[in-house]
């Protein structure tokens, strides 16, 4: 017999930033994330292949706005509303974009969802 799964709305998730990530915003408000490359495989790659000890990820205008509003208390839906108010017409098809944005952030371990 099938179990009845509750339909969860992705926009009701509450994203929480990874505390191991550093970040800063420049004078234009563009956010740059920094992640230290740890582990034995990264140490070997740093020595042999001259890979950097810290990776920097530069976000675009919408991503930067979303990142700055992510506080561990707002749902994705509430974040989208905040971004829409701040950016206005620049944030077209925002809900689809923000859902994809958070799925990418989760896959890279930059955010997780609060239960």
Image: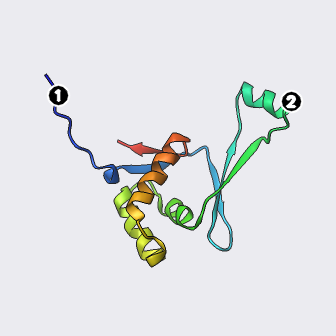
Identify residue for label 1: 3
**Quadrant where the N terminus lies?**
top left
> Left of 64 or right of it: where is 2?
left
Q: Work out whether residue 10 or residue 27 is closer to the camera in this orientation and state it.
A: 10
Residue 15 seen = yes
Query: Dot 2: what SS?
Result: helix
Classed neighbour count for the residue bearing mark 2: other residues with Cα under 10 Å, few (<14), some (14–19), many (≥20)? few
- Residue at x-position 84% and y-position 33%: 49
Task: Give residue 59's position: percent from left, percent from top.
Answer: 61, 59
Relative to 49, say whether 25 is above or below. Answer: below
Residue drawn 86% across the image and 29% down it? 48
For the residue labelled by badge 1, is the local secondary structure a helix, a strand or a loop? loop
Spot occupied by residue 70 in the image (x, y as percentages of width and height): 47, 58
Query: For mark 1, does the 10 Å Cα neighbourhood hold few (<14), some (14 to 19), or many (20 or more) residues?
Result: few
Q: Is residue 109 above or below residue 28?
A: above
First in sequence, mark 1 or 2: give its number: 1
Tag 2 residue:
48
């Amino acid at each position: 017999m099938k179990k009845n799964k509750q339909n969860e709305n992705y926009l009701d998730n509450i994203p929480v930033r990874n505390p191991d990530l550093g970040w800063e915003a420049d004078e234009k408000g563009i956010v740059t994330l920094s992640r230290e490359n740890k582990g034995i495989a990264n140490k070997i790659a740093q020595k042999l292949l001259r890979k950097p000890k810290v990776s920097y990820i530069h976000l675009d205008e919408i991503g930067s706005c979303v990142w700055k509003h992510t506080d561990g208390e707002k749902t994705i839906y509430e974040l989208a509303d905040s971004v829409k108010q701040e950016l206005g017409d620049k944030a077209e098809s925002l809900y689809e974009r923000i859902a994809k944005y958070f799925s990418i952030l989760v896959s890279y371990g930059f955010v997780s969802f609060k239960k």
